[in-house]
Amino acid sequence: MKVLMYGMTPDQKIYVDKWNKDHAADDIQTTDEQLTAQTVDKAKNFDAVSVMQTSNIEDEEVYRKLASLGIKHLALRTVGYNIINFDYANKYHLLITNVPAYSPRAIAENGLTAAMFLLRKWGGYFKQEKDLNFTRPESLMSDEIYNKTVGIIGLGRIGSATAEIYHALGAKVIGYDIVKNVANEAFVTYTDFDTVIKNADILSLHTPLDQSTQGMIGTKQFKEMKNDALLINQARGPLVDTAALIAALKKHEIAGAGLDVLADENQIFMKKFDNIKQLPEDYQELAKMPNVVITPHSAYYTKTAVQNMAEQSLTDIKRVLNGQKPIFPVNL
Ligand code: COI
């Protein structure tokens, strides 16, 4: 099989090179360029393409060109598929697959880390340490996880892994999803969306981004949340209304936020700045807040996940080219 993998990074390429070595008949080529209307021609003479979430494929031209090049399969190396325009994918008979199970634990554990960092006020202690201040101010008195109610919105693979971890730590776990997974009932009590919002001490978001979930946490939800609640978003930035989040933090409607994703994250993620003033104004505000921890969409970034995202996307491409059903179809 001949595959072009766009958006390749050195950390993933190690596993792609290994695949090439282990599968002598395959020809997997990589480029660090993203798939766009300008780079789609590079896919000429390939059987399939693979991309990351950083590709810009809103434009119908990309789908039309892929079809004209005879490409029938676009394999995402990500869980999220919000970058795909499914009207165009279906119009040009392009199969989309993703890799939903490359490591739910990677994201779940990162969410827990952000929550514990905020709950135990490590931001304050870390700052003090750098100032060589080893006192124990009352403002840094913290809380214990097993006394808390954790609310999970979205109980797919990642949400379920998150619920299981919090349950194991003794927290009460409540959750909301449009579908109920009975296997989860051992560690999460399903309830409605509003009940989760109103009762969570830690609110952890794990839904896909689409029209029904965009802005699902906004002014109304912040007003309903507990004043000492923490918001943890490891899913997609636009699930949360950024302006409403900043207002809620300023008005102490919630106590803090752990954000691995931001609404316009490409403006700052994977970039290095010299001065906080170079950030867009809303991100300046968030970055200055001691009760906000921002990580650069790195929840997924573990060795296990990076290996699996490369290998699982190539496995599905191989299956499809061999006439088998893909394991992770998104639009079959
Ligand atoms: C996803 O897999 O959907 C993610 O959000 C992680 C991505 C940055 C590789």
Image (cartoon, rainbow, N blue to C red):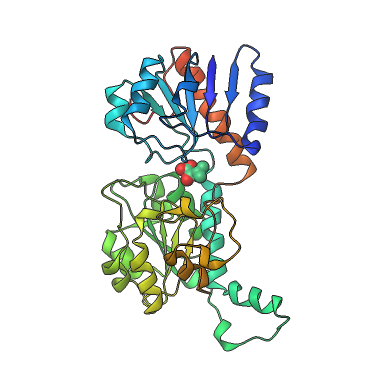
Question: From the viewer's perspective, is 21 left or right of 171?
Answer: right
Question: From the viewer's perspective, is 265 left or right of 275?
Answer: left
Measuring 48% from the left and 12% from the top, which residue is drawn there?
322
The image position of residue 301, as x and y in percent, is 59, 47
Measuring 57% from the left and 75% from the top, which residue is drawn there?
121
The image position of residue 277, as x and y in percent, is 52, 67
Q: Quadrant of the N terminus?
A: top right
In the rendered view, tell whether residue 127 sits above or below residue 234.
below
Task: Classify residue 92 by image quadrant.
Answer: top left
Measuring 53% from the left and 70% from the top, which residue is drawn there?
118
The image position of residue 110, as x and y in percent, is 55, 55
Task: Classify residue 113 by image quadrant.
Answer: bottom right
Task: Classify residue 330 by image quadrant.
Answer: top left
Q: Quadrant of the C terminus?
A: top left
Residue 169 seen anywhere in this rendered image of the structure? no
Camera-side residue: 264 or 330?
A: 264
Going by the picture, which residue comes out furthest to the right? 132
The image position of residue 5, as x and y in percent, is 54, 27
In the rendered view, tell whether residue 278 sits above or below residue 323.
below
